[in-house]
Amino acid sequence: MPGEEESLPPESERLTLEDALRAYTIDAAYVIGADDIIGSVEVGKRADMILIDTDIFSVSPEQLADTKVLLTMMNGRVVHGQDALDEYAEDFSEFEEFEFGER
């Protein structure tokens, strides 16, 4: 887009993908004092997460906008994308301790 490059911060001030994900997850939870219950996937924490259709670490930054959310879980409950859960549930079968919350 014309002028788009001009609106970006200088390269020296840009976040890496890893830093951006951390800023939106565990670091944000820490800022609000809730990193003991949210912000990362750990036993005993709320299962707030999404399943996406893209390995975001293997695509260009320009392709990130094309990523689609297939499933959303809040507190271990599927709140969006039950079809995706059914489709991908077999992928989780190796994790005997992994349990989904109520549907």
Image (cartoon, rainbow, N blue to C red):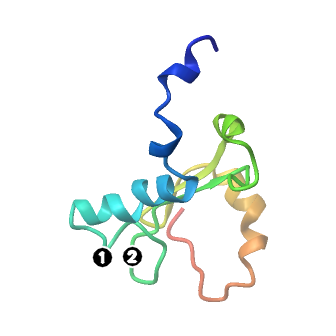
Pointer 1: what residue?
36
The residue type indicated by label 1 comes to Asp
Pointer 2: what residue?
45
What kind of element bears circle 2? Answer: loop
User: Considering only vertical position in the picture, is 69 above or below 95?
Assistant: above
Crowd around label 1: few <14 · some 14–19 · many ≥20 (10 Å): some
The residue type indicated by label 2 comes to Lys
Q: Where, quadrant-wise, is the C terminus in this rendering?
A: bottom right
What kind of element bears circle 1? Answer: loop
Residue 100: image x %, image y %? Answer: 56, 72
User: Considering only vertical position in the picture, is 32 above or below 101?
Assistant: above
Crowd around label 2: few <14 · some 14–19 · many ≥20 (10 Å): some
Labelled pair 1, 2 in contact (Cβ < 8 Å):
yes
Q: Where, quadrant-wise, is the N terminus in this rendering?
A: top right
Residue closer to the observer: 95 or 100: 95
User: Considering only vertical position in the picture, is 63 above or below 16?
Assistant: above
Residue closer to the observer: 69 or 11: 11
Residue 4: image x %, image y %? Answer: 56, 19
Residue 85: image x %, image y %? Answer: 68, 60
Residue closer to the observer: 52 or 100: 52
Give the number of the mark in front: 1 or 2. 1
Residue 36: image x %, image y %? Answer: 30, 76
**Labels 1 and 2: the sequence-earlier one:** 1
- Residue that appears at 44% across and 43% down: 13
